[in-house]
Image (tube, rainbow, N blue to C red):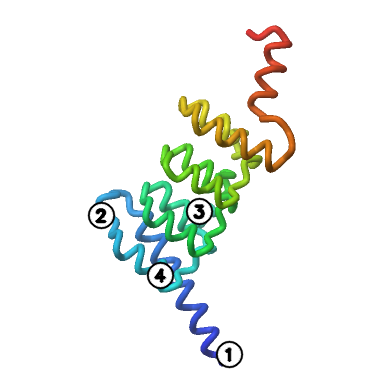
Amino acid sequence: MFITRIFNKIAADFRGEALRSELGKKDEKKINDRKVLRLIQKGADLKGTDWIGNTALHWAIYSKKKEAILAMIDKGADINQQNVRGETALLAALWFQVDDVVPILLEKGARTDLRDAMGNGAESLALAFSKADLASQIRTVYEQQTGERSYARARARSFERAGGW
């Protein structure tokens, strides 16, 4: 029993590394979607990270592989795990403009109060990329999660009161 658990853990770690390796290929056209989905279904370790803290979910977002992203979310990938740059799945989806995944991440409980190392929040990134509809959704979720009004809106108002530029 003990040996079986160790073997299963090693196998999951190996599949997780294989998954991150497959998703991390420089040429997105060379990524084998079927292999990625098969590794996820077989129980690849979704919590493991590379040297800068990217999980397989981060790599799926960077590669814009929607099926893999959804499969990982369904398998319980941590959507709020931050890499060394502070990116969560939500922030990465906004940076890499995988817009159709953002509402799903919000629905699954992505934290909207987390910021990356440069101080960018989800709402401010959405506004920076002219995604007003996403910014509105993020603002609503932020207000529900924190009980506060939107950070970006509060900063804009204080900036206006100070005389702007």
Taking 146 as reference, is 6 above or below it? below
Quadrant housing residue 34 = bottom left
Lower sequence index among marks 3 and 4: 4
Measured in 3D between alpha carbons, the distance from the residue under mark 3 to the one under mark 1, in whole angstroms, is 30 Å
Q: Looking at numbered disc 2 in the image, what kind of residue is underneath it? A: Lys
User: Which label belongs to residue 30?
Assistant: 2
User: Considering only order in the chain, which callout, 4 or 1, is on the residue closer to the N terminus?
Assistant: 1
Q: In this view, does 30 lie to the left or right of 4?
A: left
Mark-to-mark CA distance, 4 and 2: 20 Å
Q: Residue 47 carries which label?
A: none
The CA distance from mark 2 to mark 3 is 20 Å
For the residues labelled 3 and 4, the Cα–Cα distance comes to 20 Å
Q: Are marks 3 and 1 in contact (CB under 8 Å)?
A: no
Residue under pointer 1: 2
Residue lying at 59% horizontally and 44% vertically, measured from the top left: 86
Q: For residue 151, which quarter of the picture?
A: top right
Expressed as whole percent of the image width and height from the top left, the position of residue 6 reads: 54, 84
Q: What element carries label 3?
A: loop
Q: Residue 102: x, y in percent?
A: 49, 42
Q: Tell me the quarter of the image containing the C terminus.
A: top right
Q: How far apart are marks 1 and 2 (CA)?
A: 38 Å
Mark 3 or mark 1: which comes first in sequence?
A: 1
Whichever of labels 4 and 2 marks the residue nearer the N terminus, that label is: 2
- Name, please, the residue furthest toward the left: 29
Name the amino acid type tagged 1: Phe
- Residue at mark 1 to residue at mark 4: CA–CA distance: 23 Å
State the mark number for residue 41. 4
* Front in this rendered view, residue 114 or 109: 109
| Amino acid at the residue labelled 4 | Gln
Q: Residue 54 carries which label?
A: 3
